Amino acid sequence: MFSWKTTRIVCIVLLLLPIVHLAYLVSRDALAILDPSPTVWDEELQAYARDDRTSTLPKNPIVVVGGRRVTLWTELPDVLADKPVLMRGLGDAIVEDIIYNYTALIGYYQPSAVVLLPANSEFHIRDSKSPEALVAAIQDLEAEDARHGITRQFYVFAPLKSLMFPGDDPVVEETTRLLHAWASENERVTLLDGNAVLRDSSGKPKPGYYLGDGINLNDAGYLRLAILLESALAANTETAAETVATP
């Protein structure tokens, strides 16, 4: 028979275990973000590889890549139920990490389309990009994808504004402008401005679309992005069909 003191200690330890585990995960992710090496996400890549070996992979899927925002976007495959979708979020990866891991993260699946949702880490902690630097990195990723000659369309979400970092707004706006200019000259690239569907009447990010951290989106915010992407996919499908039908 255990004493009351022993029983109380055991109960306290059991109650604290989830908190300790969460602290471990947060600290592990923080250390990963601070590690500049693109190999820091190998554990997550290996987890995808294990799942792939036990799953029937779809043909010509839409592969969505990025960091934590992609990992949290769990409802997109349901919204695009008529299209095969693979969500391949990688920690808080920046675009250079995705380029480095292109084969395992994108090329392996031979996608019909790639969707990039940039992470907030492009501007904070892991990197501190200027608009020009981020656009150049995205162009490098698109060029790497085009070099393989498989993907037909490349969709890029403009960096999202956040409640946590309002000082980023001018950088986001300039990045969006540069991306728009580039996409308008590249028929393979479609720019999606998520900020346009996540703002309030004053043009600022609407709190109702964000989680409590002020950075990542909630389900309502992700639904807005999903509808935006769905519309772009439908428009490009219609354009392709018209092109084929034209003698």
Image: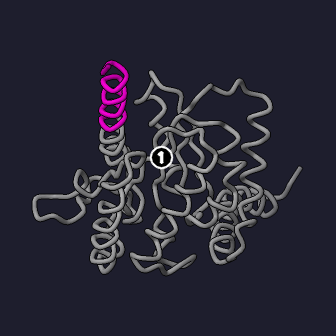
Relative to 231, say whether 59 is above or below.
Answer: above
Q: Is residue 243 left or right of residue 90?
A: left
Q: Amino acid at mark 1?
A: Val
Q: What colouring does the structure picture have? A: one colour
Relative to 127, say whether 175 is above or below.
Answer: above
- Between 114 and 1, which is closer to the camera in this rendering? 114
- Residue furthest left in the image: 201
- Residue 237: say if magenta: yes
- Between 63 and 246, which is closer to the camera in this rendering? 246
Residue underneath mark 1: 115
Q: Is residue 165 left or right of residue 66?
A: left
Expressed as whole percent of the image width and height from the top left, the position of residue 155 reads 42, 47
- Between 31 and 113, which is closer to the camera in this rendering? 113
Q: Which residues are magenta?
A: 231-247
Residue 16 appears in the picture as rendered: no
The residue positioned 48% from the left and 25% from the top of the image is 83
SS assignment at label 1: strand
Expressed as whole percent of the image width and height from the top left, the position of residue 42 reads 76, 58
Q: Can you say which quadrant of the picture contains the C terminus?
A: top left
